[in-house]
Image: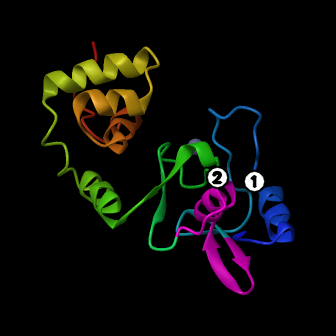
Amino acid sequence: MAVYSPITAARFWSKVDVKWSAKDCWNWRGATRKGYGNIKIEGQSHSSNRVALELFTGEPLGELMALHTCDNKLCCNPRHLYAGDASDNMTDIHDRQGRCNDTLRPEDVVVIKQRLKMGHKHREIAEDFGVHKCHITKIKAGKAWARINSG
Ligand SMILES: [Zn+2]
């Protein structure tokens, strides 16, 4: 079952700054709400990252949420989005409050920062340290462990 009509899909992508590269963020150029892209479909507001992921997978997200690996709320690049449940989102919330770093030690963070500099994938680093990749994203963005220097 298609989630959205082809007309809706075309209207949606016309508002996204689609790049050739899958690495780049595809920013939403339309209306926003609370920092997220917003599109009205049949009178209902939808966040653009959610619609992007649903169009990409062809599946309704249902209870799941579309979470970003790139920390860019306006990004609609499906390769930067993943379906997560409320606990993933809770992890995000905890992380924002700075409570979720407990599993990492400062010496781990030094290595993580060095690996980020070398261009290692967030997912690979996260797996090696047994943490969710959102932690790696936060470290990269300077939102967690900002005081630790990679030297
Ligand atoms: Zn992105």
- Residue at 29% across, 62% down: 87
Image coordinates for residue 26, horizontal then vertical, percent: 68, 45
Which quadrant of the structure image shows residue 89? Answer: bottom left
Vertical arrangement, residue 77 with respect to residue 91, above or below: above
In the picture provided, is 67 more to the left or to the right than 80? Answer: left
Left or right: residue 80 compared with residue 142? right
Task: Identify the residue shown where x is 63% and y is 41%.
Answer: 25
Which amino acid type is shown beneath numbered disc 1?
A: Val
Residue beneath the point at 73% across and 79% down: 41
Left or right, 99 with respect to 142, comes to left
Per the image, label 1 sits on a secondary structure element best described as loop
Respond yes or no on whether mark 1 lies under 8 Å from ligand 1.
Answer: no
**Figure coloring:** rainbow
Is the residue 18 above or below the residue 89 in the image?
above
| Contact (Cβ within 8 Å) of mark 1 with mark 2 | yes
The alpha-carbon separation of the residues under discs 1 and 2 comes to 7 Å
Residue 149 visible from this viewpoint: no
Residues drawn in magenta: 39-61
Q: Which residue is mark 1?
A: 16
Residue 110 within the segment the image draws in magenta: no
Ligand 1 occupies quarter: top right
